[in-house]
Image (cartoon, rainbow, N blue to C red):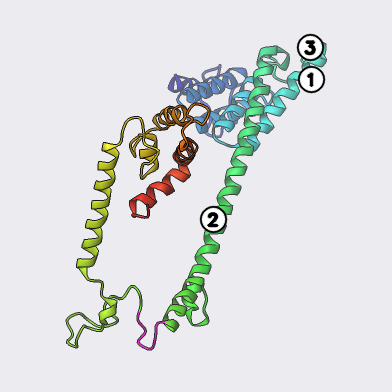
Amino acid sequence: AAAKYASCLLIDAEGEEIGVDGSNAGGRLHAVLHCNRAACFMALKNYREAARECTSALQIHSLYMKAMLRRARCHARLDRHEEAISEYQRWISLVEAAGRNPQAAASGETSSCYFDRPNDATAEDLDKARKELTDTKKAKTAKTEAEANARARAERQRWYDENLRRGGAGANAGGSDAYRRRQQWYDSAGSDGARRWDSFNGSSPKKPGGNGGRSHSQRSPPRASYQQQRNQSYRQQQQQQQETRASSTGNPNGTTHYAVLGVSSTATVAEIKKGYRKMALQYHPDKNKGDDAPDKFRRVQKAYDTLSDDGKRRKYDAEIRYGRI
């Protein structure tokens, strides 16, 4: 359709070919052809070409309302918010003026375009244009804020990069905090300048010379590390076995809060609450008249308070894991 419209634009009503500059372009017919060709480009989402076609139509009839509105929509799609807002406001003001003076609009006094006048627009068209104008203004505000945020991020990154480079380049002057911390470690490490991350103390492991620059105290025997892992694994196994042997009704004298409530270490919140209710009913001083009932109830309450709180439970599990309980 766009190609057909382009062919029609090459001739005028008398069959004369149109010049390159368009100075001898036709009147209403050519304006309508340009506007219709713009509609084709808009359907193809080629808004740039559509805007050019609307401009050509408006050059023939500057108050061609349909071409004006289509050009506003093209500008909005191309994020040319200033142009779109100006075009929408112009179109709306012409329609509102025609509504205030319908007789003058009908006689053509308010528009030189006699085939598409402002008073031809319906109330629905006016409401739609107003909504599109509001959306365009919002899009402009959002774009402005996004650009401002991008500039702020770029400025922060630039400041960070400059200060980081300054800290590295001006190391002798103690430029950055990292340098100062590293220099403080050098100053306190002794005359040999040992570093925590230098396991050979500046000496190659292939060089002769005793321990290769490392003292006996700096070595950590692998046997000790392996034994610690075995001990930790053994404690975990013992804990799991105790939880497996724990009674389903709980044991107030249990070694862990889990054993007190009779639940496993992987119990859910619902299971913990269920175990607490069962033990509370059993050892509450109002229901259990035993001499040790209050003490057992306090243990049950303490276990529930710890395991029902996520933060306390994580801390408690860590203490069990590292053998502090």
Residue 108 placed where, x, y %? 76, 15
Name the N-terminal-most of marks 2 and 3.
3
Q: CA distance from mark 2 to mark 3?
A: 58 Å
Say if 323 sits above or below 102 in the image.
Answer: below
Residue hosting label 3: 107
Q: Residue at x 21, y 67 (%)?
A: 222
Residue 111 placed where, x, y %? 74, 20
Say if 257 sits above or below 27 in the image.
Answer: below
Dividing the picture into quadrants, the one containing residue 133 is top right
Residue hosting label 1: 97
Q: CA distance from mark 1 to mark 2?
A: 47 Å
Residue hosting label 2: 154
Circle 1 crowding by C-alpha within 10 Å: few under 14, some 14–19, many from 20: some
Nearer mark to the viewer, of 1 and 3: 1
Residue 79 placed where, x, y %? 57, 36
Compared across the picture, whether 132 is left or right of 9 comes to right
Circle 2 crowding by C-alpha within 10 Å: few under 14, some 14–19, many from 20: few
As helix, strand or loop, the secondary structure at mark 2 comes to helix
Q: Residue at x 47, y 44 (%)?
A: 311
Say if 167 sits above or below 229 in the image.
Answer: below
Q: Callout 2, which amino acid?
A: Ala
Q: Which residues are magenta?
A: 189-194
As helix, strand or loop, the secondary structure at mark 3 comes to helix
Name the N-terminal-most of marks 1 and 3.
1
Dividing the picture into quadrants, the one containing residue 156 is bottom right
Q: Callout 3, which amino acid?
A: Ser
Say if 167 sits above or below 68 in the image.
Answer: below
Name the N-terminal-most of marks 1 and 2.
1
As helix, strand or loop, the secondary structure at mark 1 comes to helix
Q: Callout 1, which amino acid?
A: Ala
Residue 100 placed where, x, y %? 82, 16
Which of these two is toward me, 262 or 2? 262
